[in-house]
DNA sequence: CAACCGTCGGCAAACGTTTGCCCATCGGGT
DNA sequence: ACCCGATGGGCAAACGTTTGCCGACGGTTG
């Protein structure tokens, strides 16, 4: 277990000064090619890799990015993490994954602790309120996903548009009364979707009854299912797939045929949406691309040679039809 | 976007030397309590957080750990990541998540790049061969999960034992001929399970036919299902849940009733195992605990005041019975 | 031949923190 | 009056890297 070689070792081995070794490895053309080759050769032989700490200290850039998610076990974030990580790695950055545990305090604690150490942060579905978020956005470069912040770059996934599309799909199947099992009041997505549904409902001549709020997890699905049944709807749009899973659980338990008696639509197309029977019709969110885009935006902001405006990227969704939606059951009209 | 405060700022604000400020914040009792309070107060007001880079350079410890997994999208690793991360964070460590992309080169590249920067590594289901793994284990502190390395600490999940239990379960349901849809030849787990199955089969009076190797992912399931059908077995043990999902897909497609005509057992109890219909009977691996234990082991090795032997922790599994297993169909004996 | 320029290498400072060492002060024992 | 130990604080070096600056050398131009 020997100490890793440093630039000093490489320099000594190739008979040059440390500064020359540094430049040979990082500044192409700055040193004589012959010398550079000698240095690179020595580095390779010694198995040299630069210390990020040393680099960070001297350059002020750590090439580390914090990736903060409210709950690492929620499959919704897997795609985002993956997309972000892939893009960051392509640029030689590493990321530190932070589980904020759905808690504002934990999230702020992490940001505070990491601020001197990371170059920036990607906040996915932050639980911070607007004021805090704005304050933090002045503190260091950050990009949000699905959480618009004034004068700040961010990525939005247009699930609201997808919700409109899903409603049209249901309307085309003959559904006339549809429930929306909504997410947390604090969710910006939820507010937008409710607004879209209102106007789309009018246009399509469909009645939409809003339910909830529900916590977007499987355990809350049964309550949503029961509420939907009580409202006498023939289809339910769930805030996310997890909630939809729970709804399917409960409908199966109560012996309600899906999609024969009730259609169910999820949102996000997370892992598992095509595992459940019947397969879940859902609004597919390009999660990986969202992570990708978030990383792109952050890297652009981090690049000193960059103009530096703020951009908001909105990603489209598309409807994936599986088995959980079907034609509306015939209703007895009194 | 102002530069984060440093120890120098804190020291200036509280009228002490940098060294005193450092000690006030990290060495309880070393400075006068009154002074310490003043320093801490200043640090709080300024929103000071130590720079990990600075710390790392001076102390030689970065408090960062690399967490290497072959594929971040495989739900098998979610639990491990979560468990490891939680334990590390409790000790003030952060982790860098590395996706080795199922590639030996990528895995080694990451290890090489990270070696000067992290204090140690957790390797989950490493794809490295024994020699390389042993070589790396001499280079810096590491702990493996599900991959024993001589003279090195590691965590093993006893899926082999679970497999024996699963076979007993099937035997008790009357199955007399069972297939094992195995994983990659390189997998240590797979080899152990085959060995256990051989002796258990003899003891239980069950015939076990080995199939495979299959790549442990859903897409490979159909091939396994067809092979099992061809062998005329009444039950199949899959290398992991992903493979089992694919098997269920194919059986449904071919109109084979599960568990009426064929029982299916998975392994790991990943997210989704209770989503599929019928629910998947599976060997539940305590993944989060495994991550936890791995982090524990690594932290112990990292602690300079630690004895420093190597330990192997073996975690038990348990069988979760869901709907995918049932009594064996009556067979026509010629 | 002088003035100049381009190329290439080295020196040393800087980044933020920890820590070994030293010094000043103070209280108490002889 | 003297010494001693304990306490609390500061100085400065060290960690590994980057980079501004300078200097040496050789070649070209006037």
Image (cartoon, coloured by chain):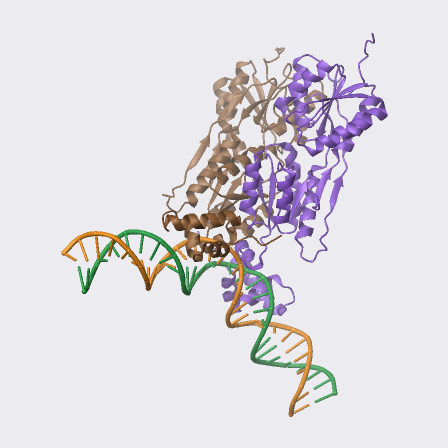
Chain colours: A purple, B brown, C orange, D green
Q: Which of the 4 image quarters holds residue A220? A: top right
Q: How far from the left and from the top, in percent, is residue A132?
A: 62, 41
Q: Can you tell which quarter of the image residue A82 is in? A: top right
* Left or right of B262 on screen, residue B51: left
Q: Position of residue A212 (x, y in %)?
A: 68, 23
A132 left or right of B297 in image: right
Total labels: the figure holds: 0
* Residue B225 visible to the viewer: no
Give the residue at x 52% y 61%: A7
Residue B327 lies, in percent from the top left, at 58, 13
Residue at (57, 23) in percent of width and height: B282
Residue A141 visible at all: yes
Q: Is residue A205 above or below residue B65?
A: above
**A194 w.r.t. A36: above or below:** above
Quadrant of residue B303 within the rendered picture: top left
Q: Position of residue A13 (x, y in %)?
A: 50, 65
Of B83 and B315, which appears nearest the observer?
Answer: B83
- In the image, residue B163 sits, relative to residue A62, either above or below, namely above
Near-viewer residue (B25 or B185): B25
Viewport quadrant of the C terminus of chain B = top right
């Amino acid at each position: 277990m020997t100490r890793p070689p440093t630039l000093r070792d490489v320099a000594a081995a190739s008979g040059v000064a440390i500064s020359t070794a540094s430049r040979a490895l990082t500044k192409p053309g700055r040193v004589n090619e012959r010398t550079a080759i000698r240095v690179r050769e020595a580095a390779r032989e010694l198995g040299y890799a630069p210390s990020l700490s040393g680099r960070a200290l001297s350059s002020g850039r750590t090439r580390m990015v914090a990736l903060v998610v409210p709950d690492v076990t929620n499959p919704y974030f897997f795609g985002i993490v993956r997309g972000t990580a892939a893009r960051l790695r392509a640029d030689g950055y590493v990321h530190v994954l932070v589980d904020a545990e759905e808690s504002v305090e934990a999230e702020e604690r992490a940001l505070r602790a990491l601020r001197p150490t990371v170059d920036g942060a990607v906040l996915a579905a932050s639980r911070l309120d607007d004021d805090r978020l704005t304050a933090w956005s002045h503190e260091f470069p950050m990009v949000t996903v699905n959480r618009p912040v004034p004068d700040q770059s961010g990525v939005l996934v247009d699930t609201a548009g997808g919700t409109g599309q899903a409603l049209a799909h249901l309307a085309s199947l003959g559904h006339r009364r549809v429930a929306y099992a909504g997410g947390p009041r604090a969710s910006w997505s939820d507010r937008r979707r409710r607004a879209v549904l209102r106007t789309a409902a009018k246009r399509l001549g469909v009645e939409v009854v809003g339910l909830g709020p529900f916590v977007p997890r499987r355990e809350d699905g049964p309550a949503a299912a029961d509420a939907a049944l009580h409202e006498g709807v023939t289809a339910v749009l769930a805030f996310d797939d997890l909630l939809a899973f729970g709804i399917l659980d409960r409908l199966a338990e109560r012996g309600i045929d899906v999609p024969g008696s009730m259609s169910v639509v999820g949102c996000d197309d997370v892992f598992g949406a095509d595992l459940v029977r019947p397969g879940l019709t859902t609004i597919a969110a390009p999660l990986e691309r969202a992570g990708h885009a978030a990383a792109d935006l952050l890297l652009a902001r981090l690049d000193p040679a960059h103009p530096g405006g703020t951009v908001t990227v909105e990603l489209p969704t598309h409807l994936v039809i599986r088995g959980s939606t079907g034609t509306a059951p015939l209703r007895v009209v009194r």
